[in-house]
Image (cartoon, rainbow, N blue to C red):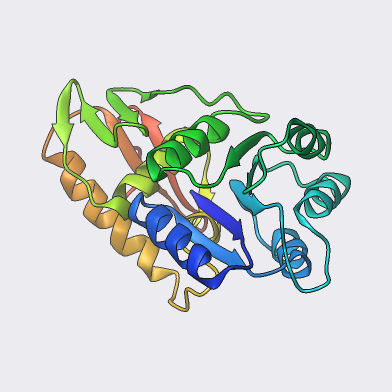
Amino acid sequence: MRLLVVEDSVKMAGLLRRGLAEEGHAVDVAPNGEDALWMAAENPYDAVVLDVTLDGGGPDGFEVCRRLRQAGAWAPVLMLTARDAVDDRVKGLDAGADDYLTKPFSFEELNARIRALLRRGSEERPATLEVGDLSLDPARHEVSRNGKPLELTAKEFSLLEYLMRHPDAPLTRLTLLEHLWDFAFDGGSNVIDVHVRNLRVKLKQLPGRTTIETVRGVGYRLRDGKVDATSD
């Protein structure tokens, strides 16, 4: 999943980026409120990790969250703060935040809260994804076909997770790039083809009916069934 981290502390931003990337997420970092608003308007984020206190004279986290909602940006927002006052938590939730985490915190809790937020939204987001004979558990980072485990890299896992969250939907290479690689990525769209090919090889190690189809002129889709004539 692609996340936006809004944090003015260079050290904290680096820790968050590294920790979330290790979970397979693509992570962009905004150092202030103005950059956060611009980046959120330009990129399709799956969730936002937003610090309340932002230096630099721009909007604070409460105002950033409020403006995101006013602009129709509905990605789940997890607010981070050193404050522990009830009034601040209420203010954040009233501004449109979905959850609140007080510093210091453990990465295990941060990741668990982000997983919970990703299950919310306009689409149904079950705790365990099931498409045909494939099962994926984001919390445990486990994938299986017909009950037999598959070993995937972090990026292969994220790719399969995104495909499973949108079964039967043709997804363009650009869409996959936007959701699985961060703002600094400067590669070509063939990186998607490479990861899809590697993922297909691993899926074929355990025969089954759920396949990644190539949609000519578009991209890829995950289907529970046999590959048709339009697929590679």
Residue at 65%, 70% (x, y): give it: 31
Residue at 44%, 36% (x, y): give it: 109
Above or below for 208 versus 69:
above
Above or below for 79 versus 138:
below
- Outermost residue to the bottom: 186
- Residue 72 placement, left or right of 190: right
Could you tell me residue 197's position as x and y percent?
Answer: 26, 56
Residue at 38%, 69% (x, y): give it: 190
Could you tell me residue 125's position as x and y percent?
Answer: 53, 26
Could you tell me residue 5's position as x and y percent?
Answer: 58, 58
- Residue 208 placement, left or right of 32: left
Q: Visible in this render: residue 152?
A: yes
- Residue 197 placement, left or right of 182: left
Could you tell me residue 101's position as x and y percent?
Answer: 58, 39
- Residue 204 placement, left or right of 29: left
Q: Nearer the viewer, residue 102 or 219?
A: 102
